[in-house]
């Protein structure tokens, strides 16, 4: 097994907790202002009706019940010793502070839960919510995941994100000032983006000072606007080797202090339209490791030249 040539999240968790730690995804019943009419209706063009990344989550059960079920699976499959409650689908700060506190506290009260990951949008972080997150950051292991997807305004409009790059940058500054760590989500392969624009995204993240990044392959799910565009031939997706090369180029330009939490998308096989090669997630990750080894490079390599 090749040693990672990037600052991986699994290594971070081992350093912090000294044991195998796994995330348990939770659906806490949130929605999104980009879907409920506050900003727009329909959401981002790639997001399915259940919310991005929501397939397989036990809906309709309490936060604690979902975690207990997840613990059983993660312990059996991966021998996990500790767990992080991952509030994943939709915008998990899009509610009054009192409701947020109750949900987050419920998660942390479950035995062996050692932290929180909270996925949200940059426009769902009013000052009282940031203050709440700062309080949790002082007393538990906390990440806030902010969807950027692209720093380019033309791409944000195409994706129907409903926010600007400036809004994302302001949210990052707000979180950093409060002592809240931010993991940015970006998509490689947004239609219309040139390769050099995708690679410049790494430098933009460096300059913003985000602490983590999740890199996603643009993948097409059923019943989305993106699927309609794909059927009309308006979307070109990279093949596996092309994507692997692009990720390696991106990593070489990424500040080595940034923790890499994901390097490919993994849409559920029941909903995935394309690219089907992305279903072999571990083969893709291994190919990235092999390519970096072949190049003799790694995260941040170009920054030291």
Image: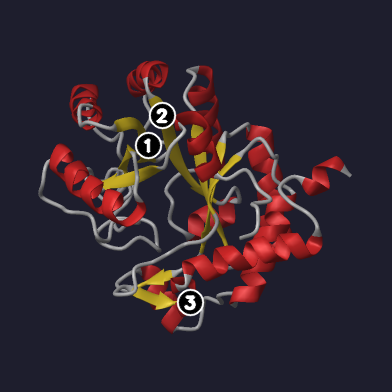
Q: CA distance from mark 3 to mark 1?
A: 28 Å
From the viewer's side, name the closer residue of 156 and 21: 21
Q: Quadrant of the N terminus?
A: bottom right
Q: Quadrant of the C terminus?
A: top right
> Residue 256: where, in percent of width, then height?
69, 39
Q: Quadrant of residue 83?
A: top left
Q: CA distance from mark 3 to mark 2?
A: 33 Å
> Residue 279: where, in percent of width, then height?
43, 72
Q: Is residue 41 above or below residue 232?
A: above
Q: CA distance from mark 2 to mark 1?
A: 6 Å
> Residue 183: where, in percent of width, then height?
50, 39
Evaluate if marks 2 and 1 touch, with contact meaning CB atoms under 8 Å apart.
Answer: yes
The residue at the point 36 percent across, 37 percent down is 118
Number of marks in the image? 3
**Mark 1 or mark 3, which is nearer the start of the sequence?**
1
> Residue tagged by mark 1?
117
Is residue 189 visible from the viewing direction of this image? Answer: no
Element under label 1?
strand
The residue at the point 59 percent across, 78 percent down is 239
In this rendering, position of residue 84 left or right of residue 262: left
The residue at the point 48 percent across, 72 percent down is 278
From the viewer's side, name the closer residue of 160 and 222: 222
From the viewer's side, name the closer residue of 113 and 179: 113
> Residue 51: where, in percent of width, then height?
29, 55
**Mark 2 or mark 3, which is nearer the start of the sequence?**
2
> Residue tagged by mark 2?
142
Element under label 2?
strand
Residue 275, numbered circle: 3
Evaluate if marks 3 and 1 touch, with contact meaning CB atoms under 8 Å apart.
Answer: no
């Amino acid at each position: 097994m090749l040693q990672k040539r990037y600052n991986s999240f699994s290594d971070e968790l081992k350093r912090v907790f000294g044991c195998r730690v796994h995330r348990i995804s939770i659906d806490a019943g949130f929605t999104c202002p980009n879907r409920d009419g506050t900003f727009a209706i329909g959401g981002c063009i790639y997001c399915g009706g259940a919310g991005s990344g929501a397939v397989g989550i036990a809906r309709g059960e309490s936060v604690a019940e979902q975690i207990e079920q997840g613990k059983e699976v993660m312990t059996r499959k991966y021998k996990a010793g500790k767990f992080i409650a991952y509030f994943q689908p939709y915008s998990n700060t899009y509610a009054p502070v009192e409701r947020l506190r109750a949900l987050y506290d419920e998660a942390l009260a479950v035995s062996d839960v050692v932290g929180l990951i909270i996925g949200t949008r940059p426009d769902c972080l009013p000052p009282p919510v940031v203050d709440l997150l700062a309080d949790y950051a002082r007393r538990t292991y906390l990440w806030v995941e902010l969807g950027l997807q692209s720093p380019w305004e033309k791409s944000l409009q195409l994706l129907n994100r409903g926010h600007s790059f400036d809004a994302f940058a302001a949210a990052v500054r707000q979180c950093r000032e409060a002592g809240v760590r931010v993991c940015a989500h970006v998509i490689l392969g947004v239609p219309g983006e040139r390769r050099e624009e995708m690679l410049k995204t790494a430098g933009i993240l460096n300059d913003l000072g985000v602490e983590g990044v999740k890199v996603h392959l643009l993948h097409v799910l059923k019943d989305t606007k993106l699927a309609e565009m794909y059927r009309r031939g308006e979307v070109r997706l990279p093949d596996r080797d092309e994507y692997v090369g692009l990720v390696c180029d991106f990593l070489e330009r990424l500040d080595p202090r940034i923790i890499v939490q994901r390097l490919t998308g993994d849409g559920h096989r029941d909903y995935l339209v394309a690219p089907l090669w992305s279903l072999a997630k571990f083969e893709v990750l291994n190919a990235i490791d092999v390519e970096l080894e072949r190049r003799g490079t790694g995260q941040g390599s170009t920054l030291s030249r």
